[in-house]
Amino acid sequence: MSSKPLPQLPKLNHPDEAIERICGLLPRLSVEKVEQRDALGRVLAESIQTDRPSPPLDVSAMDGFAFRLNELNSKLMFVSGTSQAGHPAPTLVPGQAVRIFTGAPVPTGADVVVKREDTDEQADRFELKVEASSLRVGQNIRRCGENAAVGSEVLAVGTEIGPAQMVAIATFASSQICVYRRARVAIINTGDELIEGGSPALPHQIRDSNGPLLESLVRKRAWLQLTSRSRVADRYEALRSHIEQLLKENDALLLTGGVSMGDTDHVPNVLRDLGAAIVFHKLPIRPGKPILGAVGPQGQAILGLPGNPVSVAATALRIAFPVLKHLSGFGSILPAMLPATLVDPDQKSIPLHWYRPVQFCRDSTSGTFQVRLTPNLGSGDVVALSASDAFVEIPLNESTHQGPWNCFRLE
């Protein structure tokens, strides 16, 4: 076992400083091409631009009739043809109208579409039920390129592809698109006390919940690839051998436990002896103060999270996953924060950035969502964590008042 003293690390005052510091040392992953149908959940490595105007021509926004407004001499007008989506527009006969359906091309020369419900229609004519003075040029027409001109960027590099983004990809992208490779992630849970969930447990044993928690968070993110989840006893040589092997196969390691100051907390020394550079160790946060961030010898991201479940959840979402998002090419990596108002705040404060578990609730008067602090007994309270929906972030030394506070979801 190595007994060399750990080097002195710079003092960091905010979790964002730790994220920025380690991300500045980590390269992005390589790029690959995937079929459109396989792009959901991946991260764009190329800009998606329009290859033609959107819409590609003037189209009707309504079912109705298209004509030249200045040719409307009475409320009665004859119909010379029909325009349907997916077909070229018919020729507009002077002084007459074309029956038109939503999304169909507007005939050349037509400059207004009157809604079907504003007419009394017959097979070859219609009569306006509204005053002609209420019509205006361009009414109910979606102009060519009004959404976007040719060459407009619709999705930027670093965008996560969700259902909404698939619409733009299907509309404008080629059959294959460039995305960042999925980050290969291994989860390692350390501790002699850990046993598999569902197993009979002696009083001195703990069923591993950190592993399933992290696995569920990784599996929900299609831009990550979980390669393994394992448990290792608090033995220096066993931990070193295990981490050494996993570093050969992965882009990132998520560890829990073994990062504090106890005699069996071997993670910092193991990482240093394997050639990893420890970037930060300990942050002014609760829960999760002992958190460690390191860069492996081949540029792997290594996040050592404390062992208690509430600490794991808070630090994984607030710090570890932003680092993984950097690896994976995201343009914006910090967790999405929503303003949250606390019901029944307790006014407590601590000299640390405090991540407090909360439950969503609905204000009975306005119907808006608010949050309520989850009663809990500390970072090992798995019952409280299981009842929580999110964390509110209370800055150091600030009283936990009504807020609003930044809130990030536990998902």
Image (cartoon, rainbow, N blue to C red):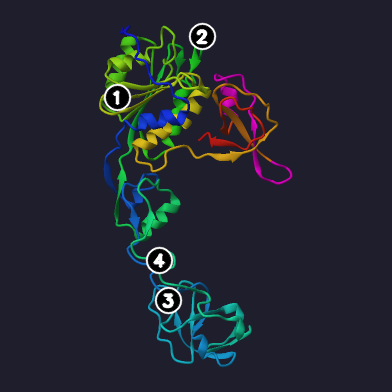
Question: In the image, which disc is placed on residue 54?
Answer: 4
Label total for image: 4
Q: Secondary structure at mark 2?
A: loop
Question: Image check: 109 left or right of 404?
Answer: left
- Name the spot of residue 232 as percent of width and height, x first: 37, 16
- The residue singled out by tag 3 in the image is 105
The residue beneath circle 1 is 296
Which residues make up the magenta segment?
Answer: 363-387
Image quarter of residue 341: top right
In terms of sequence position, does the residue under pointer 2 or pointer 3 come before the other? 3
Q: Which class describes the residues within 10 Å of circle 1: few (<14), some (14-19), or many (20+)? A: many
**Quadrant in which residue 87 is drawn:** bottom left
Q: Could you give the CA–CA distance between mark 4 and mark 1, rounded to whole angstroms?
A: 46 Å
Q: CA distance from mark 2 to mark 4?
A: 65 Å
The amino acid pointed to by label 4 is Ser
C-alpha span from label 2 to label 1: 34 Å
Mark nearest the camera among 3 and 4 is 4
Mark 2 or mark 4, whichever is nearer to me: 4
**Circle 1: residue type:** Gly
Dot 4 or dot 1: first in sequence order is 4
Question: Which numbered dot is residue 204?
Answer: 2
Query: How far from the left and from the top, in percent, is residue 314?
Result: 50, 28
